[in-house]
Structures are given as structure tokens and as C-alpha cells.
Amino acid sequence: MRTRNTRRGMAVAATLVSAGLVLAGCGGSDSEGGSDKAGGTSPGEGKAECAQLTQFGDLSGKDVTVYTSIVAPEDKPHIDSWKVFEDCTGADVKYEGSKEFETQLQVRVQSGNPPDIAYIPQPGLLQTLVGTGKVVEAPSTVSDNVDKWFGEDWRSYGSVDGKLYAAPLGANVKSFVWYSPKMFADNGWEIPTTWDDMLALSDKIAATGIKPWCAGIESGEATGWPATDWLEDVLLRSVGPDVYDQWVAHEIPFNDPQVVESLDNVGAILKNDKYVNGGIGDVSSIATTAFQDGGLPILDGKCALHRQASFYAANWPEGTDVSENGDVFAFYLPPMGDEFGSPVLGGGEFVAAFSDAPEVQAFQTYLSSDQWANEKAKATPNGGWVSANTGLDIANLASPVDQLSGEILQNPDAVFRFDGSDMMPGAVGAGSFWKEMTNWITGESTQDALDNIEKSWP
Amino acid sequence: MTTAIPDEKGVEAVVAQEPVTATAKRALSSPWASLAAIVIAVLWTIPTFGLLVTSFRPESAITTSGWWTAAWNGGWTLDNYDQVLNGSDTNLGTYFINSMVITIPSVLIPISIAVMAAYAFAWMKFPGRDFLFVAIFALQIVPIQVTMIPLLTLYNKAGVTGPDSFGGGFYTIWLSHSIFALPLAIYLLHNFMSQIPGELIESARVDGAAHVQIFTRIMLPLMAPAIAAFGIFQFLWVWNDLLVALVFGGGSLEVSPLTVRLAELSGTRGNDWFLLSAGAFVSLIVPLIVFLSLQRYFVRGLLAGSVKG
């Protein structure tokens, strides 16, 4: 309730503020437009690695502020990866990260103090921000880079009404099942390549007395999100990307019979007493186990399979060997049939700009290039980062899981779809969807859960 | 505990005169009441104790077992404290100093303004006094979240935000904390001040004292407990504040207090949450010192508001 009141308060405030801004804007002289280039000779002139950046001229002494949701220690590789840009242009990039990014960014945009660049993790948020009119359309250099290095699907996630606003940056793959290669080898289990194989393997493991699956969906106020990924992954596999897109855009109802069937398929695993919750408890313990802890029983041999995104790699305790023959690794969540290729569910960040100054556009250009993707990969020695940029050399990625993710993202057969809950309206994607999935785990029927979400769609 | 002895004698002297207090004292010091007090105290302290134990356990032990198994499970380590103190690109000392730089002016500014305003409302007669006082009192019910965007917009237009501005970006945080604290501060101090016997002021006037002298010579010394009590309130509030610092500091690391670092301690995806227990104890030290050293004022200030005479 409190958030709702706050939001309403903010909305009222924002209305007043924007009225004030409009009035204030009448008096000011407009100096926008045509500020593509700065004068002078770029410090990077003549250096091979600066080829794309010298066109913006000498940017010495200029600052670019970057605001992201990425905080220490993951921010270090980002800052390191900008060195080439700073050397080539002379501009200085200032980093700010905050876990309250999503709220704070909107506050700063509404009050007229936006950062130059923001890394936006959800297409839904990008649409909201573009709606405020403060986001600057991506320059042609960025647009060209995106066309060259990213797939059409990624371009569309950074676009609003057909205009490209934000180039894709990093990516993560959510269609992964974590397992223990050692445990599999000891028991003679094979990595399943079809959905039915996976269920057969689950039965086989269950017969040995181990509950094959473990899961945890508790995540503070976002409790329930890992279960939404489950549904999205299964839906994408059973009905295909086209119906999935319609479902995300609400062209078919949220509680469409196909969705009900998919959620029942999820329930066949997550609500099956024989399958869950390995090493933790019964079915309802899924709702109370922190998502960070959900897969840890694999290390003790009390659980065999845990479906979670590539970024779960960071949750294994220090000293865990995360590789193909190590303590833990991940395999691609198998498809349910051949007709839809290899569907991949994932997420990523996008670079939105609130200024059209030359140093900002130069930085956007750098971030959308293959050059940055490779620099970033080299600057991330501990792994935990990957991009859908096709110019990224997979050999530069540090960890085996990142390499696997990179291969999946660059696989031409892969059908990538963005995490649907990130694209739905906030009331659903960051509200009822999470809550009802949690209720569903703790006993609500599939039909009731989906009906309730459908009712809450604004 | 030598200082406690004269106090106890004093209490007993009072008890001898007032049988009601004596009954209360006997009831409260009965073995059952003591037992109940101990049970409540233990129950109340268990979570904090668990947090303390957790802060010394290694990551793998924290994530796989409860703190009550610590004695025989997992061993002990100082790694968590090491990571909290040295684990970020900015030294924790910077945040600590930022917290100080934010907190001290944010306590002093509202108190100095509020004491003077309270004096004016309590002892000076001017047209519209009651209306103004009610207006200030009413401001307390405005939730601070509502004011944030308009206030930040004003700051942005006035050009006082950002690291290049006056006060290095701290100015907006100080000002905001002062704004949010003033209604309650004026109200509290006014109530306290208006209970000071009018004869004191009148006799001072007879002796030829003007407002300034009455304020500095009579009021300020008498107000010390109330000022200290409010000071502790305000100190703890500002020290523990995250929202105001985040919104008005603009998230810039150069002006971020300890709470901002604490909020980000668990990492981008919350995978370092085991550090939070150690972080909590690091940030707890200063408020604890302040509270313990000013505690006697705190209790006196609370009582002073309620008992006449």
C-alpha cells in the first residue's frame, strides 16, 4: 500500500513538475540539435583501435555520467572496459551504480537531473522513460552498429515505436539447468536433449531416493520471479515464439488455455512431491527458499537439477569448480519438440541516453561496437558477463558458463525471446505475476492463479 | 558502578516519602517481575545475538546452516568484516566520513533554528502566532516521499545539486534533512519550553533582561536535556537514513553515506547477502556510542516533557 501511495504522490508531484517545466521552457532559448561533433583533433587520431571514435573530435575535459543498477564488485569490469574510449577521445566517464536504480532513475528524470547514460535492464522501463520525452534517440552511428552486430530481435527490444533508442549491452541466458557433472558421471546419467528425456531422467533420479529438482523463489519484494521464468521458458517451448509474443503483448489473454497447459507442465516438475525440493524440503519450501540458495543442495549431492539463469554462477560458494567436468555446470533447458528450433529465454541491458552531446554519442557508439564487447570480456577475468553482440569473440570470455551462454546467443538456430515479465506492465510483470506464482507454489490451482493475473492486467 | 550509589540513595529517600512509588518498586522488584524482565530481555536480544554470531561465520556455513549451530559447525572467520571494510572500490572510510559530514550539520542546523523558533512561539507575542504554529504543526503530516520530486526539481533549478556546486553536493542533503526535521523539532521544543514556569521569565524581565538574554542565559541551560534528546533522535534518523541521501545526493559516490554502501553490500543480484550481518555491526558502532554517551539526557528529556514543575 505504501508504495502505491508513494507512487500516486509521485505522479501528482510529477504532473505539477512537468507543468512547471513547460512554463519554464517557454522562456529559455533552445540550443539543441546539430551538436553531433566537437571541434579539434581527437587524441586518438591515427590509432587503429580508435577508428570509430575519432570522428567525434577532441572531447578532452568532457564528462559522461553513467547510471546503472550494477554495483560493486561487478562494476569494476565495466569501468575497466572504458579505458580505450577514454584514451581515444580524452573524455572522462563517471560511474554511478545503485540497487535502487529503477526508482531513482525515474525520480532523477522527472526532477530534471538525469544522467547522460543509463543502463536499462528492462524494455518495459525503457518504454516508460521514452514516454517522458527525455530519452534521446540513438544516433545513426549507434543504429549502424546495432544493425551490424545484433540480431533483429535485440534491436526491437531497444526500440519504441520503430525508433531505436537504446542499443543492447550485456545479456544473460535464463534457459539453463544447473547440474553436477561429477554426480552425473558417477551415476552414469546423460545430459537430456529433449523435454521427455529430461522427465525420464528425473524419474530415474527419483527412483534412487534423491529428489531430482531443487528450487527457491524467495527474493524479498520480488519473490516469485524465478517461477515466472519457468512458465515463460515452458511456454516458449510448447507454443513457440509467435504465441509467446502475443501473450507478452496481451493479444491473447494471460489465462489462455495454452498458458494453462504450460503452467501445468511446470507444475508437473515444481509441484511434484517426488521431484522437489531436493535437499530443502517439500513443495511449499520452494516459496520460502531464497533464490540464491535454491541450487546449493547440488553441491551436497542432495539435488541433481536446478533451472536458473547464467548469472547463478556467482552464487556458488568461493572455490566451487564451475566447468564442464567440475563441481557444477549448466546445460541448455531442452526443447519440447523440433518445430520451434532452440528457444532461448534471457535478459539484458540497454544503453539509453538523456543527452545528445558529442561525448555522449561517442560513448554510445563505443558501447554498441564489437570492440567494446571484446574489451569488456577481457576486463572480466572472473566471468559473469556475456553479450549478444555477434562480434564478440567467445574465446575472450573467461568462464565456461559465459562461453556456453555466448555460443547459445550466437547460435543462428536460437530463437531468442526477452523475459516476458520484464516487458509486461509493472502491475503484472513486477506485481501480480510474481505474487500469483508464489501462491500457485503454495497451493493455488493453475486456473485460479492465471485468472487472477488476467484480472490484474491494467 | 560507583556513580550508581548516590542515585540509589536518592531514590530511597524519595520512596520513603511516597508510598505509591514504594508499592510500585516492590511490585517491580519481585522475583517474578525480574524473571519476566529477564525473559523479555533475552528474547529481545536473541536476533541481535544471532546476527553477531553470523557475522563471524564463513560464507558456506552461513548459507547452509543456522547460526545456532555455529559452535560445532563451520568455524569462525573475520573475512566478512574484511570484505565489508575493504571489498569495494571506494574505501569504507570514505563512506564513514561522508556519513559524519552529512549527519553533524543535519543535526545542528535544525536544532539551532528550532530552538529559536520554539522560543518565539512560546514567549513572544506577535500577530498570527497561533496560526503559524498550527501551520508548522500540520506540516508534520506531509509524508516526505511526496515532497521529493518537487524539492529536487527546485534544487536542480537553483543549481545546487551535483559535485561542482556549493558544498560539494552535500548542501542539498543537509538542507533536506533540516527541512524534514524542523516541524517536529519546533513542536517538541515549543512544548518543552512553554512548560518552563512563567515566573522565571517575568523575574528576568523585572531584572531588565531582554529576549536575547532570557534566551541565552535562562532558556538554553534549562533546555539542554530536551535539546540533547531531540539531538539523539535526529542523529539516529539521519545516520540511518537511506532515502534522503539517495534522492538528494543523486547516487553520487562522493556524497554517499554508509547506508548507501550497506544497501549495495549484497551485490547486484543479492548473492553476497552473507556480508550484511557484518555490515550491520560496522554501521551500528557510531549510533551506539552516541546513544550510550547521551543516554542520561535521553531519559531525562523524555521525562522532562511529561512531568510538570
Image (cartoon, helix red, strand yellow):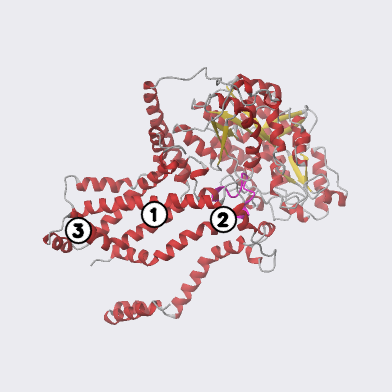
Q: Does residue A419 appear in the picture of this structure?
A: no
Residue under numbered circle 2: B279
Front position in the image: A399 or B39: A399
Question: Tag 3's secondary structure?
Answer: helix
B138 left or right of A207 in image: left
Image quadrant assignment for residue A457: top right
State the image coordinates of residue B261 (x, y, percent, origin top left): 54, 49
Residue under numbered circle 1: B234
User: What residue type is disc 1 on?
Assistant: Gln
Disc 2: host chain: B
> Mark 2 Cα within 10 Å, few/some/many (few <14, many 20+)?
many
Residue under numbered circle 3: B214
Q: Can residue A130 be found in the magenta stretch?
A: no
| Above or below: residue A422 compared with residue B284 | above
Q: Which residues are magenta?
A: B262-276
Asked whether the beta carbons under mark 1 and mark 2 sit within 8 Å of each other, the answer is: no
> Mark 3 Cα within 10 Å, few/some/many (few <14, many 20+)?
some
Image quadrant assignment for residue A5: top left
Front position in the image: B170 or A22: B170
B112 left or right of A141 in image: left
Residue at mark 1 shares a chain with residue at mark 3: yes
Disc 1: host chain: B
